Image (cartoon, rainbow, N blue to C red):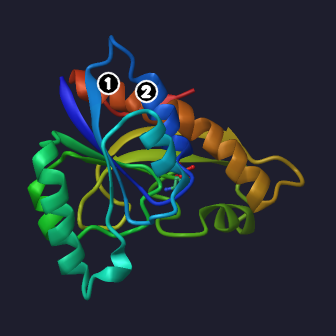
């Protein structure tokens, strides 16, 4: 049974999809939901589910290294086997990555290696792409460039805006991330390509 800590910053729709997928038969269980944003809606959801939660407001730390040190200290008592980043809008430094080697997963709203970083939907639309999607990958020190664990594609339709495309991609995220986490926790072959 793998112990998973979830790291979020906002709405937590991926967190919700992941937690809802983790029934009795699941090879992993949530041990902590941590947010760098005290107002994250996902934090409230996790509390309502009776899960252990923690808030580490990054604005209270003088440096990224100090935040990372506090993050590791907050995680340690929960002894997670892996971290799942689900809309976590902070870049993790080398000490955190070294503490969980090949055990940090992230979801990114593009078909990596296309469009690492921010504003992925605007960039896909500006490029005239005919499809978009999302990727789950291992977190390494190279931003959004760690080994691919899964990918799901969606069409880009005439008249799409960044808002309509984001909603379509998020629907795919909510299928892909739970499917990848289940396989990862069970030690099954990855990457997974949907649909
Ligand atoms: C998702 O689109 C994810 O790909 C990106 O941040 C967003 C988080 O949304 N990294 P939510 O908080 O899971 O609703």
Q: Residue at x 50, y 48 (%)?
A: 44
161 sits to left or right of 72: right
- Outermost residue on the right side: it is 159
7 sits to left or right of 132: left
Residue 127 in sight: yes
User: Looking at the image, which is closer to me, 190 or 10?
Assistant: 10
In the depicted structure, whether residue 185 falls above or below residue 75: above
- Numbered mark located on residue 116 in the image: none
Mark 2, secondary structure of its residue: helix
Residue 180 falls in image quadrant:
top left
Q: Residue at x 24, y 60 (%)?
A: 140
Write down the residue under mark 1.
183
Image location (x, y in percent) of residue 39: 52, 63
Write down the residue under mark 2.
179
In the depicted structure, whether residue 91 falls above or below residue 108: below
Image location (x, y in percent) of residue 88: 42, 59
**Quadrant location, the C terminus:** top right
**Quadrant location, the N terminus:** top left
Residue 168 falls in image quadrant:
top right
Pointers 1 and 2 in contact (C-beta within 8 Å): yes
Q: Residue at x 18, y 53 (%)?
A: 75
Mark 1, secondary structure of its residue: helix
Image location (x, y in percent) of residue 163: 76, 57
Residue 91 falls in image quadrant:
bottom left
In the depicted structure, whether residue 46 falls above or below residue 34: above
56 sits to left or right of 176: left
1 sits to left or right of 178: left
Image location (x, y in percent) of residue 178: 44, 30
């Amino acid at each position: 049974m793998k112990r998973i800590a979830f790291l979020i910053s906002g709405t937590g729709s991926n967190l919700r999809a992941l937690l809802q997928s983790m029934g009795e038969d699941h090879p992993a269980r949530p041990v902590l939901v941590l947010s760098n944003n005290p107002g994250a809606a996902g934090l409230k959801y996790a509390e309502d589910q009776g899960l252990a939660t923690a808030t580490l407001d990054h604005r209270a730390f003088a440096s990224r290294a100090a935040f990372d040190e506090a993050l590791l200290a907050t995680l340690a008592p929960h002894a997670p086997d892996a971290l799942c980043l689900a809309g976590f809008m902070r870049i993790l430094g080398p000490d955190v990555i070294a503490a969980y080697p090949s055990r940090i997963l992230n979801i990114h709203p593009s078909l990596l290696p296309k469009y690492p970083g921010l504003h992925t939907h605007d960039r896909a639309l500006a490029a005239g792409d005919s499809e978009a999607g999302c990727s789950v990958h291992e977190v390494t020190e190279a931003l959004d460039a760690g080994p691919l664990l899964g990918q799901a594609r969606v069409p880009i339709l005439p008249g799409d805006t960044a808002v309509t495309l984001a909603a379509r991609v998020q629907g795919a995220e909510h299928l892909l991330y739970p499917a990848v986490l289940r396989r990862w926790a069970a030690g099954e072959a990855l990457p997974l390509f949907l649909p």
